[in-house]
Amino acid sequence: MTADEQSATTRRWTPESASAFGRSVGTRTAVAVLAVTLLSLSLRLFALGSRTFHWDEARVGYWILRYAENGIWEYHAVIHGPFLYHVNKYLFQWFGASDFLARLPVAVVSGLLPLTAWLFRERLRRVEMIAVGLFFAANPVVLYYSRFMRNDVLLAAFMVYALAFYTRLFDTKKPRYLYLGTLMLALAFTTKENVLVYVVTWVGAAVLLFDHRLQLVAGADDRKAFLREEAREAWRALWVGRWGLHLVLGILFFFAVVIFFYAPRAGPTSDPGLWKAFSNPGMFPAVIEEATVGSWESFVSKWGEGNQKSYLSTFKSLGAVLWAGSAALLALSVVGFVTDRYVGERPRDVVSFTFYWGFVSVLGYPVIVENAFPWEVIHAVVPLVIPAGVGLAILVRWGAEAITDGDAVSATLAALLVLLVAGQVAATGVTTTYQHPADQYLDGESERNKLVQYGQPASGLGDTLERVRYASKQNEGTDVLYYGTDFYVEDETENDRWSAGGGWYDRLPLPWYTEKYGAEVDSTVKLNEVGSNPPPVVIARAGDRSAVADRLDGYRAYEEEMTLWGSETVFFIDEDYRRPQAGE
């Protein structure tokens, strides 16, 4: 092999090599990507606050409200990263707490995901960019949990942003993309601890991409020469091109963002806190240590052991959710990857990288997750969007070429496949996200809604919560009294921060709502206290309904499920404090 041939074989992927697609990305493509992004945001913001808070949303939301009130926060791995705590604290203080506002950061961050297709414009064709954007916008799993106050979609989205900016860095050699990508990576570290799994999968995918390069070089001597040249170019970039300075600054920027988010916020005590350290700089070492070493120790103590359950049972549970919500995406991701890997002149890095990332996540998450909750599949679905978009674009191009060639059979088949994919995505998204977002079943009892987790209150609780809000606003003193050992908390102040005491967790999601309403709450296990000057709202388990009802006069009872099943709870509301509802 001559030097020229070796150079042609081993050359890097550059913006110039993207011209093999035979086009420059134009205004119409940019407009299409923007239109898909607006669709994505609209799907997330429409009726965003309509579903009653899930158990997990409610506990975190309650503690954010308490943090906004007392200014005290410290990292606990069991409730994951600090991003939502700090962001939502300010949103609640500025605009007032609501279900809509609590979910807004996740909805917006994920809603903007289609824009990342534009950052891959040197790596993807026009139709591929639009297809990728559509999958980000409408995939049922991503859409459902984009309307949920949890960290999983935030983590996946920030990592896609990071990859997109870093890819743009390689394409343009502009330092600003290094800092933008690093900001996104740092924000990902503030969301959830399994960001470390992302780092591992990225390293593995990068190794496989490097192996792609070596496979293009024939002969052991040529590979050695290739490795030496790669090392020399990296060295020149670091020192001659001053990328070493940018790399150091990027690392410092990363740790600055992470420390800012993880640093404890302290109340009026001697404990170290970020804001207190500015008036007492001697606290900064303790604050930095707690934000880094302390956070790491908390993470290891909670999540270091991984999944202690059967791999196969966990894989089966997560696989059922993955198939129910993303069957078309899974199939098309394989089509996109295989076609790009073996049919084209050479595989594209971004397609291979994201497929490896998603494929390993499908196999790996059953090993590491503590529980097979449906939101875990997000971490496999999101990276597979890119090869799936490539796969969908293949069907579109196949149909377009068939029309050009006058092949009616192939054109019809391609159109039917595209419509089948669109129909499956749309139908699943509409039923799971809008028609049955809090229901155990999608259609009677024939089809289970696999995206809804057990901690989601059943449909109907919202009306009763509105009655509780109205009664609390009309009352002075204790507004809500919980009865029974399930709900009893000896000292209500124990609930301010993790971990709350007694039966507080069995009350969820009610603490979020009573705190948001400004209701004064108490609890008891003594029946005689229920009937002695009772507040306008008394809450008990359904098993205690008769005993509590005998102690109350002039109350109307409403029975609700606090979870999907098995948590029947009765709300007794004083008729004098009850606003009549339509139809009553």
Image (cartoon, grey):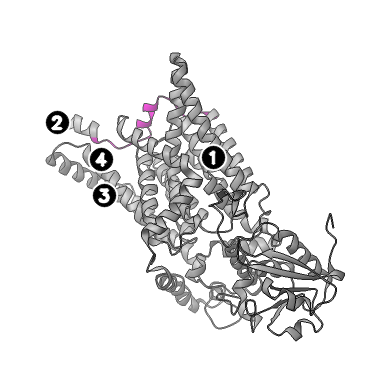
Q: Nearer the viewer, mark 3 or mark 1?
A: 1
In terms of secondary structure, where does tag 2 sit? loop
Mark identifier at residue 425 = 1
Q: Which residues fall within the magenta stretch?
A: 10-27
Q: Quadrant of the N terminus?
A: top left
Nearest the eye: 568 or 50: 568
Amino acid type of the residue that numbered disc 1 sits on in the rendered structure: Val
Distance of label 4 from label 1 (alpha carbons): 36 Å
Nearest the eye: 139 or 265: 139
User: Can you see residue 179?
Assistant: no
Distance of label 4 from label 3 (alpha carbons): 19 Å
Mark identifier at residue 527 = none
Which of the marked residues, 1 or 2, is nearer the chain's N terminus? 2
Distance of label 3 from label 1 (alpha carbons): 47 Å
Which of the marked residues, 4 or 1, is nearer the chain's N terminus? 4
| Residue position marked by numbered label 3 in the rendering | 235
Task: Say which residue appears at 31% left-offset and 48% top-offset.
Answer: 206
